[in-house]
């Protein structure tokens, strides 16, 4: 789409400068009393392009199971794992390719097919259901992270806007949540969120009002594709404005950081190395949970259909998406499995960080539910059946853990989400196409 008016270089730089500062504008209220009980956390890690289908599922069911080759990096967390087999999102069976699977991954809905910016997932993602019900308990209701900018344009092979491939967190049917992709900015945002309220609130609110006015005027001069980016930007601003106002509301729950964030080294500016960036994002999730700045996070290892180069792994010769379309070629299948196992290794790294954080007589991992999964199983066929899903942590004793649970074919993934909402103390009667809690998940 062409812009309706040309923009000067100065205008673009000014807008970019404001956008960089905005995620840091957070302000907090007074501290909580000492001796606060351990709290639960929830995170969802999304792997694009599926996984080698023959090396994911463990052997054996119940507590008598053996981890598969891809899941081997999770061996030391065996008693913390809930591995579920034969779940799917029925809403993703329509449409070709990847986009229906990724944007519906946490909503268990069918997205609206569109070539433009009028995206609609027709639901709310499970992380945001929990975030909406726990709003005000922490400075940040939730934290959305990724490694790549939002992909724009149209995938004409399947007739969907590529924007769908960049979002798993949805605050509403037409409200995909913007992700932060620079670990340094995440750190700065968390740091700012732990500062006490004061004159900063008034100053930041004035700045936000100015930014909103400027951004709204600029939006009218953009083409449709750029308007989507501006809408995400405005969504961040409005969210910040709501949080700032919440700090001054009478009766707001008091809060204090559980760990001084300034004791943690600040990350270097945006790392160029994908592996380094991923590890730093795992560190940021751990830091957010350690300080109790938020209790809900989502992370996308990459946008769906990403062709991220994995040549930093020995034996990998091409991009992720190309390898996922392996056509049963033995060499590509070998590389596909290696990429899947690398993602599990990063997951294990996060779990190790959370286990190391002591909290009373327990640790943060014990109080958490950290889900790892993908919206498709076999990338070569875009299969939405029998999704690769594993949850680590016991949610303060609410999850049984230490199990491989196999269900009837095409059991709704929403049933797992319903169970997780129960364990997070934010129960709902139904979520999307759920038919009931998954037997065996809850302790």
Image (cartoon, rainbow, N blue to C red):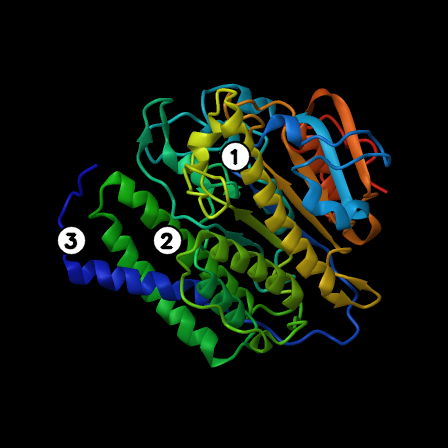
Residue located beneath label 3 in the image: 7
Mark 1 / mark 2, whichever is N-terminal: 2
CA distance for labels 1 and 2: 37 Å
Residue 236, picture quadrant: bottom left
Dot 3 crowding, Cα within 10 Å, few <14, some 14–19, many 20+: few
Residue 64, picture quadrant: top right
* Residue 341, placed above or below residue 358: above
Q: Quadrant of the N terminus?
A: top left
Q: Residue at x 53, y 67 (%)?
A: 190
Residue located beneath label 2 in the image: 233
Residue located beneath label 1 in the image: 335
Query: Number of numbered discs present?
Result: 3
Mark 1 or 2: in front is: 1
Mark 1 / mark 3, whichever is N-terminal: 3
Q: Position of residue 394 (x, y in %)?
A: 79, 49
Q: Residue at x 76, y 43 (%)?
A: 81
Q: Determine whether the residue tagged by mark 1 lies in a helix, strand or loop.
A: helix
Residue 34, picture quadrant: bottom right
């Amino acid at each position: 789409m062409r812009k309706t008016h040309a923009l000067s270089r100065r205008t673009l730089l000014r807008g970019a400068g404001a956008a960089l500062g905005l995620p840091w504008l957070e302000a907090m209220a007074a501290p909580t009393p000492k001796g606060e009980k351990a709290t639960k956390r929830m995170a969802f890690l999304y792997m694009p392009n599926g996984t080698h289908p023959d090396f994911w599922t463990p052997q054996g069911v119940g507590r008598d199971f053996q981890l598969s080759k891809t899941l081997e990096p999770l061996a030391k967390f065996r008693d913390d794992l809930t591995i579920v087999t034969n779940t799917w999102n029925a809403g993703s069976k329509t449409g070709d390719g990847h986009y229906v699977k990724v944007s519906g991954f946490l909503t268990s809905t069918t997205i609206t097919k569109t070539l433009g910016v009028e995206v609609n997932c027709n639901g709310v993602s499970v992380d945001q259901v929990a975030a909406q019900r726990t709003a005000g308990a922490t400075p940040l209701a939730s934290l959305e992270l990724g490694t790549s900018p939002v992909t724009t344009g149209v995938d004409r092979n399947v007739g969907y806007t590529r924007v769908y491939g960049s979002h798993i967190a949805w605050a509403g049917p037409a409200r995909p949540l913007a992700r932060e992709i620079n670990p340094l900015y995440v750190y700065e945002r968390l740091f700012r969120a732990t500062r006490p309220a004061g004159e900063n609130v008034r100053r930041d609110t004035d700045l936000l009002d100015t930014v909103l006015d400027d951004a709204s005027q600029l939006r009218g001069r953009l083409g449709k594709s750029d308007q989507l980016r501006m809408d995400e930007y405005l969504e961040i601003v409005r969210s910040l404005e709501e949080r700032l106002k919440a700090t001054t509301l009478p009766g707001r729950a008091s809060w204090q950081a559980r760990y001084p964030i300034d004791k943690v080294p600040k990350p270097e500016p945006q790392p160029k190395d994908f592996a380094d960036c991923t590890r730093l994002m795992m560190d940021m999730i751990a830091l957010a949970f350690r300080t109790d700045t938020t209790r809900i996070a989502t992370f996308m290892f990459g946008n769906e259909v990403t062709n991220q180069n994995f040549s930093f792994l020995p034996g990998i010769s091409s991009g992720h998406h190309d390898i996922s379309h392996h056509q049963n070629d033995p060499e590509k299948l070998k590389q596909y499995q290696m990429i899947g196992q690398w993602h599990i290794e990063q997951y294990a790294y996060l779990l190790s960080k959370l286990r190391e954080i002591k909290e009373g007589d327990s640790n943060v991992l014990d109080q958490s539910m950290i889900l790892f999964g993908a919206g498709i199983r076999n990338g070569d066929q875009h299969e939405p059946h029998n999704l690769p899903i594993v949850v680590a942590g016991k949610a303060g004793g609410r999850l049984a853990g230490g199990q491989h649970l196999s269900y009837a074919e095409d059991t709704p993934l929403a049933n797992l989400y319903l169970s997780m909402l129960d364990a997070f103390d934010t129960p709902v009667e139904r979520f999307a196409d759920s038919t009931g809690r998954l037997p065996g998940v809850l302790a």
